[in-house]
Image (cartoon, rainbow, N blue to C red):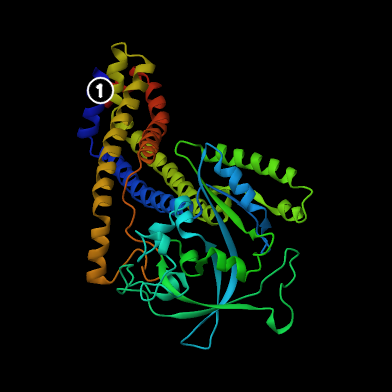
Amino acid sequence: MYKIVLAFRYMFKRRISYIAFVSLSLCVFIVVVVMTVMAGLVSDFRDKNHSFTGDCIVGTDSLVGFPYYENFLNILEQQDFIQAASPVIKSYALFSPSWTQESYGFEVMGIEPARHAKVTGFAETLHYRKSNVSKAFEPLYNSELDGGIFGVEILLNRDVNGHYSYSSSPAHDAWTASFVPLTAKGAPAKAGAGEVSTKTFYTSDYSHSGLARIDNSLVYLPFEQAQLLTGMAGQEKRVSAIHIKFKPKVNIDEGSQKVSMLWADFTEKKSGAGNAALLDNVTVQSWKIYRRSFIAAMEKEQMMMTVLFALMGITTVFIILVIFYMIINHKSKDIGILKSIGVSNANIIQLFLCFAGVVAFLGSAVGLFAGWVFLAKINNIENWLFEHFGFQLWDRTIYAIGNIPSQMAPHVVLVIVISAFFVCLAGAALPSWLASRQKPVETLQVSQL
C-alpha cells in the first residue's frame, strides 16, 4: 500500500514529475491523432478498392481476353460459397467528344450493370441511376440512345469542399469511341483502313468510386457492345475477367483458393479446345492481391509513420529516464529511511516502477482524452481554418478525400496505451535499479540530513 501512496505523492508533490507527465501526454496525443487519421485513410482506401473489384478476380492482363467464360460462370453459379459473378470486358479506346477535335485515351470496362452491382459497389458510385442500376446505360434525356458511364473526374470538377456540381440530368454529350478489335491470336480483327471500330455513346451517368485513378480515366460501356467493339464477340466469345463475390462469412483467401482449384480443373478439361492456350495466362487472385500495387503504397506510408513514432517513443524513454534519475537523486533520504526499516531492493524498484505506472496511466489517459476531443472536432477545426485563413490539410480540388477520418480504432488505442506504459517503465528501469543499490549509511549521513 505504501508503494501506491508514495507513487502518487511523488507524482503530485514534485513539479519535475509534471514534465514527464506532459511529455507523455503530448506524445500520446500526437500519436493518437496522426495514427487515427492515417489508419482511417488506409482503411477507407482499402474498402474502396474492395468495393470496386469484388472479392475475387479471375482475369488476364492480355487485351485478347480468354474464351469459355460462360462455361466457367455456370460452374461458379453452382457453388454454395459464391453469391454472384460478373463477366467484364477491359480494354482501352480513344474518345472524341462532339464539342472538340481532340481525342482522349480512357480505360474501358464493359459490364452488365445489374449483374456487376451484385458483385461490387458499382451501384453506389452512380449519381442518377443509383436506385435503378439496370437502366444505368439509358440516358435520362433519351432512353433510346446508347449510353456510357464516365468517371466523375472526366467531366466534373471538385469544388474547395470536395463536392461536384451535378445538374438535374447528365450533360447531353456525344462521345465517339474508337477501338482496335483483336482476334484470339492478337492480330487486328480488321484489315486496312477499316481496322478501327467506332461507335458513338452519350453520357448516361457519372461514376464516383472515390479512387482518383479510376474516376479520371475509366468509362463503363454496355457489355455486349464493348465485347463487339474489342473483337471479343463471335463464335467463341471472350472476356477479360470474371469478378466474384463470396457469400457472407466466407473467408476471402479460402474462397479464392477454392476458385483457383475450380479454375485448374476447368482448364484441364479444356486443354484440348481450340483456344485453350489463352487460358494459361489467366490468374485467380483475391482483391487484396489484385489491387496490391495501389494499396501497398499507402500501407508503406503508414509503416513509415509507425517507424517515426517508434523513434519518438525512444526519445521519450530518455526523457523519462533523465527525469526519474533527477527525482530519485532528490529522494535519496526517503530511500535510505525505507531501507533502514527493512524494505528490500526489490520493493524499492517496485516503488519507482509503480510511480512510472502512475505517470503512464495519467499521461496516456489525458493524451487519449485530448486526442478524442480533437478528433471529434477536427473537421470543424479544418473548416474554421479554411474559412478564416484558407488552410486545408488536403486541397479537396486535387485530392479525392472527403472528411478527415476521426474514428479511433480500438486496436490502435490499445497499442498506444501499451506502448505508453512500456516507455515509462523502460525509462524508469535504470534509475529504479540505481535507487535500490543505494546504502542507508550513505544516504542518512548527518551531513546530508
Q: Secondary structure at mark 1?
A: helix
* Residue at the spot 77% in from the left edge and 47% down from the top edge: 271
Q: Residue at x 27, y 39 (%)?
A: 16
Residue 98 position within the rendered picture, expressed as x and y whole percent measured from the top left: 48, 85
Classify residue 443 by image quadrant.
Answer: top left
* Residue bearing the label numbered 1: 4
Note whether 184 is above or below 327 in the view shown. Answer: below
Type of amino acid under label 1: Ile
From the viewer's perspective, tell me whether residue 415 is left or right of residue 286: left
Q: Position of residue 158 (x, y in %)?
A: 36, 71
Q: Going by the image, does 394 lie left or right of 369?
A: right
| Residue 381, picture quadrant | bottom left
Viewer-side residue, 383 vs 189: 189
* Quadrant the N terminus occupies: top left
Against 151, is 7 above or below? above
197 on left or right of 252: right
The quadrant of the rendering that contains the C terminus is: top left
Q: Which residue is found at the position 36% from the left and 76% from the top?
A: 141
